[in-house]
Structures are given as C-alpha cells and as structure tokens.
Image (spheres, grey):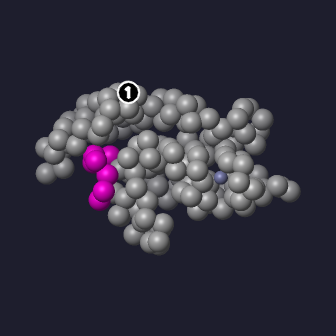
Amino acid sequence: MDRLNTRNILKRKKHKLEGNNYNCALCNHNVEETALHLFFTCPFSQACWQHLGVQWNLAMDFFHMLLHAKEGFSNPFFMEVFIISAWQIWKQRNNFIFSRGQPSFLAWKTGFIDEARLRAHGISENKRTLFLSWIDLYIHFELKPMAEMFCTVRN
Ligand SMILES: [Zn+2]
C-alpha cells in the first residue's frame, strides 16, 4: 500500500509541476521527462540504482520488472530500498526545478542514507539491525553486498 500511495503522490506532484519545459531535470539529454525516463532510464537514476545493486530489466512491464529486480537483489529489503531511492531521485529533481540546487549523486546518497535510517524504525526489530548494517557497510562505505549476512532472514 505504501508503494501505491507513494506512486500516486509522485504522479499528482508531477502534474502540478509540468510547465513549458518537459525535459528531464536530472540529465542534459533533452529527453522528455516521463516517469520511465526519470526513475529508470535517466543516466542519473541509473547511477543511483547501480550504486544500490538494483538491476532493472527494461524490456519487462513494470510489475515483472519489480519482481525480477527483487529476486536479483542482495537483501530482503528490496521494497524499502526501492521506495527510498525513488523518493530521493524525485527530491533531486524537485530541488532543481525549485532552484534549490543542481541534481547531485552525493546529495541523493546522503538523502538515501538519512531516509533509510529513519525508516529503519518501521522495520521489525530482528531485521532492523541487518538493514542498518547494510546501509552502513554497503551504501555508506561502498563495500560489496554482504549477501551471506542476510541468508538467515530470508528463510
Ligand atoms: Zn534524464
């Protein structure tokens, strides 16, 4: 449900913001800003997903694309990671549109980490430690995904 609400909110905000310039704010490719471009095919977003270890198969429809990415993801927190990352991509785009700064990978990453730490409170206690470890070890310090850490949670 959280995912659906978030997507609806994004869609509503997008409609309000569209003015004369329909081009993507996150890259200089002069591509019309569609949800597909902004969140998945934009070089900016692709760098974000790559950093998180999320692989999108763009040949699939959205539902199967999500399932496929979830299956290939290294830990059990795919939906949390997906929502937080998409939200932060959206924030980078809004920052630019409202003249609060240039889109920045570092700002996205800092926002991701802050938001993920906040959201960790909503995760059950036994999984929270693993989620926080993943943020600290993988996202913050850019180490390899610690897949073996999460085997016990998955079962
Ligand atoms: Zn773009």
The secondary structure type at the circle numbered 1 is loop
Q: Is residue 27 left or right of residue 77?
A: right
Question: With respect to residue 90, does 32 lie above or below?
Answer: below
Residue at 78%, 35% in the rendered image: 99
| The magenta segment | 71-77
Q: Main secondary structure of the magenta part?
A: loop
- In the rendering, at what x and y percent does residue 2 appear? 45, 52
Instruction: Name the image quarter holding the N terminus.
Output: bottom left
Q: Is the distance from the Cβ of mark 1 to the nearest ligand 1 atom less than 8 Å?
A: no
Residue that lies at the very extreme toward the front in this rendered image: 29
Residue at 46%, 48% in the rendered image: 49
Residue assigned mark 1: 141
Q: Is residue 21 visible?
A: yes
Residue at 56%, 54% in the rendered image: 39
Q: Callout 1: few (<14), some (14-19), or many (20+) C-alpha neighbours within 10 Å?
A: few
Q: Inspect the image, locate mark 1, and give the three-letter code of the amino acid beneath it.
A: Phe
Q: Is residue 37 left or right of residue 76?
A: right
- In the rendering, at what x and y percent does residue 47 appear? 51, 45
Residue at 28%, 46% in the rendered image: 75
Question: With respect to residue 126, does 15 lie above or below?
Answer: below
